[in-house]
Every structure is written in C-alpha cells, then in structure tokens.
Image: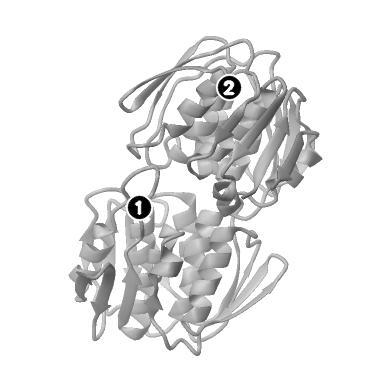
C-alpha cells in the first residue's frame, strides 16, 4: 500500500494548475445516460473515482473514450441499467446514475452505497423524489430497484439540503412530462455546472444556484461539448498549504468566484489574496492568525475545507473554534494532528484548536479524503519527516498531488 513521505519546513513557492472538479465531473459523466448522442467533456481530472464511474458506465453499455483530459461518452448502446455493489461500494457518487436511468429507460437497479467514514449520507431524499414523480421503488437485498412507465413532473421538497439528491432529481426531471420544481435545492457551483451541461444538451432548467430549481421536461436531449469547472476544494487545499508554510503561490485555471468563504477566512488569517480572471495568488504572513469557522451548505464555509483549516489553525497565533454541522464523524484527522504535536480539544461537533509554535514529523494515518489533505498540509510545516499512511483516499480526489506540490518546492515522495 502506498504512503507519502514528506520532509517539512520549506515554504511553497511558484505556480501550479488546478484540475477539473471531481464533484462536478461525476454527475456530469452520468448526464451522458440521458442522450443517445455523444457527450464530450473536457478538463476531466484523472482520479480513482472518475475511473470507477467510467467503468460503471461502460458496463451499462456506454462507449467510453479517454484522451488526456477529454472524455467522450456515447450511451446509444445503453442496455444494462445496473450499478452493482462491487463498483458502488468504493464510491457513493455512483447513486447518481439512478435519476438519468429512470428518465431514459424507466428502470434502474442501483446498489445502496456502503458506509462512509465521515458519517451517514442517506439516499432517502433521492427515492422520495422519484416516487413523487411516479416511480415504483423497492429497496431489497441491498439494492434500489426502481421502475416507471414515464416520469412526470412534480413539486419536490427535500427535507435536507442534499447535493447528489438535487443533481439526481434534476437529471430525472429533464425528460419527465411537465414541470418539476425542486425546493430546498442545493446551491453548490457543481450543481450549476451540471445544469449548464444539461442546458447545452437541450434541457430547460432555470434557478440553478438558488434554492428553487425549475425543470421543464423535454422529449429528447442531444449531444454536446462541456468543460468541467475547476476544483474549488483542490484550490482551497493548495491555498491552505501555501499559507501554512509561509509561502507565495499562483494557482492557474481557477477562480475566487467559487470559494468566497474560504478566501475570506484566509484573509482573516493574514494572507494577501490576489484575484485574476482565471488565477489566484496568495502571499502568506510571517505568522498566521487563528480563524474560527462553522461549516454549512454553500455559500457558507464548506465541510470539505474544514480539515485543511484545522491544519492551518494548528500552527496559527491564538485559539480557533471549529464547528462541524454537516457530518457527525468529521474530526477523525484531529487525533492524527495531535500525533504531530497539535493542541486540539474535541467536544461533540466542536473542536477548540490552540496554535503551537511548531509541529514534529511522525507517522500518521489518513481516514478519509479531506483528512488526508490536512495531514499533508501539517506535514509540510512539521520538523523532520512525516509519513502519511492510507493515501488511497487522496487518489480519489487529488490529481498528481505529490507532483504538484513538488513543483511548488515541497519535498514529497510516494513510497510503497
């Protein structure tokens, strides 16, 4: 099993390109199921989750071609609307095939996602929405088995803000009879990117990016070409890494438009942030100031950046209070940061982080994707060597991480 060996103590400096967004690419890959014409996607990152999704689509009968960061999907031969447990267990986003399959062929059998280290992420909102649109849904033997003659438009209200639920129901509604209104919809930029792709395929969608999305069903969607948005969480992760190490970086192929709440917190910590049309610059202060935060659905502070900011606060001046309101088990990285010398106290969904003067390298274990990133950030500033175990989590969401950090002057290498 691969590990990352980090020698800390060097400020990050230079320029690096940000990849396409994993959380935008995954639903947009599923959108190909809605048409019998090719969908061409550019800026698709090379990640394990993307590879798993392409494998899943291929076994459904979708023709998949990949050339660099361009993926062409042709679902004309779609003939197997099944998402088996073997593929779904490693990637919860596989449930995103449910809505498009119901819309296109009226039947889907999708394995329930397995457990997730950071907490429960139920799919009941997806099922409730499809039932409101006329589907018969059974959950048995670990599978969602759904059938419908033809989906019909409906007024849908989700009990909780759910990104994948919003995306699944929006895709299902594109080919339904009549109008569908999704209330309490997720507002994330990735939802907007999916809507933009669907509109380019001929869908009629308004309100994406607000909490009420309206979709008027059409008879057919056609092929299109779409560029995946930049990854805002990768962007935020590299900004945090530069800030913690006292560095100065320029990130290209990205924008501050998607990460206002993250940029505000970095500026509160004392960083200078510059915004260009498709680039961001950061210059770190001599010592960061502690910043308190509370995670909440977009446009508030993202839960996917909480771990990285905990790593930042660990070496900042002062005490920060971090409140996690999205997932119940999302402080598992704290125990590992303490192994490096951090001063963190956990009480339920609240972490109190008091900055220390220095961290010391040690062997730590990644528990989930963003926890991995926090440990790498801490390793970059720790004295000596830090060995991060279980980095398969990282490969799910960060493209060529050690290569990109190396380009910024970090000493990071993959070891077996």
Mark 1 Cα-neighbour bin, 10 Å: few <14, some 14–19, many ≥20: few
Quadrant housing residue 205: bottom left
Query: How far from the left and from the top, in percent, is residue 305?
Result: 50, 36
Is residue 66 rendered to the left or right of residue 366? right
- Relative to 246, say whether 181 is above or below: below
Is residue 316 rendered to the left or right of residue 413? left
At x 35%, y 39%, the residue is 327
Circle 1 is placed at which residue position? Answer: 115
At x 35%, y 24%, the residue is 350
Quadrant housing residue 276: top right
Q: Nearer the viewer, residue 361 or 200?
A: 361
Q: What colouring method underlies this structural image?
A: one colour
Q: What SS does tag 1 mark?
A: loop
Q: Nearer the viewer, residue 54 or 175?
A: 54
Q: Is residue 273 visible?
A: no
Kindly report the distance in space between the C-alpha atoms of the residues bearing marks 1 and 2: 28 Å
At x 56%, y 63%, the residue is 50
Q: Earlier in the sequence, mark 1 or mark 2?
A: 1
- Relative to 363, say whether 40 is above or below: below
Q: What SS does tag 2 mark?
A: loop
Circle 2 is placed at which residue position? Answer: 340
Query: How far from the left and from the top, in percent, is residue 100?
Result: 39, 74
Is residue 207 rendered to the left or right of residue 30? left
Query: How far from the left and from the top, in percent, is residue 294?
Result: 39, 28
Q: Nearer the viewer, residue 355 or 192?
A: 355
Mark 2 Cα-neighbour bin, 10 Å: few <14, some 14–19, many ≥20: many
């Amino acid at each position: 099993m691969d590990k990352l060996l980090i020698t800390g103590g060097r400020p990050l400096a230079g320029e690096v390109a940000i990849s396409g967004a994993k959380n935008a690419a995954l639903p947009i890959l599923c959108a190909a199921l809605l048409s019998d014409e090719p969908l061409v996607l550019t800026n698709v990152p090379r990640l394990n989750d993307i590879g798993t999704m392409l494998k899943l689509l291929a076994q459904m009968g979708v023709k998949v071609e990949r050339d660099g960061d361009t993926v062409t999907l042709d679902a004309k031969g779609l003939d197997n609307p099944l998402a088996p447990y073997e593929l779904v267990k490693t990637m919860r986003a596989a449930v995103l095939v449910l809505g498009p399959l119901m819309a296109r062929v009226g039947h889907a059998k999708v394995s329930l996602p397995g457990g997730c280290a950071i907490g429960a992420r139920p799919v009941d909102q997806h099922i409730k929405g499809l039932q409101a649109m006329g589907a018969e849904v059974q959950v048995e033997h670990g599978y969602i088995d759904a059938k419908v003659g033809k989906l019909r438009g409906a007024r849908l209200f989700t009990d909780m803000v759910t990104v994948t639920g919003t995306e699944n129901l929006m895709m299902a509604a594109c080919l339904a009879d009549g109008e569908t209104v999704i209330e309490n919809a997720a507002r994330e930029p990735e939802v907007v990117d999916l809507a933009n792709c669907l509109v380019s395929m001929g869908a009629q969608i308004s309100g994406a990016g607000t909490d009420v999305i309206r979709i008027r069903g059409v008879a057919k969607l056609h092929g299109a070409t779409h560029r995946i948005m930049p990854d805002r969480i990768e962007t935020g992760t590299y900004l945090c890494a530069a800030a913690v190490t006292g560095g100065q970086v320029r990130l290209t192929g990205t924008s501050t438009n998607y990460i206002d709440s993250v940029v505000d917190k970095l500026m509160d910590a004392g960083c200078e942030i510059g915004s260009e049309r498709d680039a961001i610059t950061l210059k770190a202060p001599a010592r960061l100031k502690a910043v308190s935060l509370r995670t909440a659905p977009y446009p508030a502070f993202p839960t996917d950046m909480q771990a990285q900011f905990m790593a930042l606060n660990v070496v900042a001046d002062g005490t920060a209070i971090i409140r996690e309101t999205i997932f119940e088990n999302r402080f598992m990285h704290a125990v590992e940061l303490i192994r490096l010398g951090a001063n963190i106290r956990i009480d339920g969904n609240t972490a109190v982080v008091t900055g220390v003067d220095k961290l010391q390298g040690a062997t730590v274990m990644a528990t989930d994707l963003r926890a991995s990133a926090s440990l790498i950030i801490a390793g970059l500033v720790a004295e000596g060597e830090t060995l991060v175990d279980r980095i398969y989590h990282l490969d799910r969401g960060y493209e060529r991480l050690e290569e990109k950090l190396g380009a910024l002057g970090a000493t990071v290498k993959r070891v077996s």
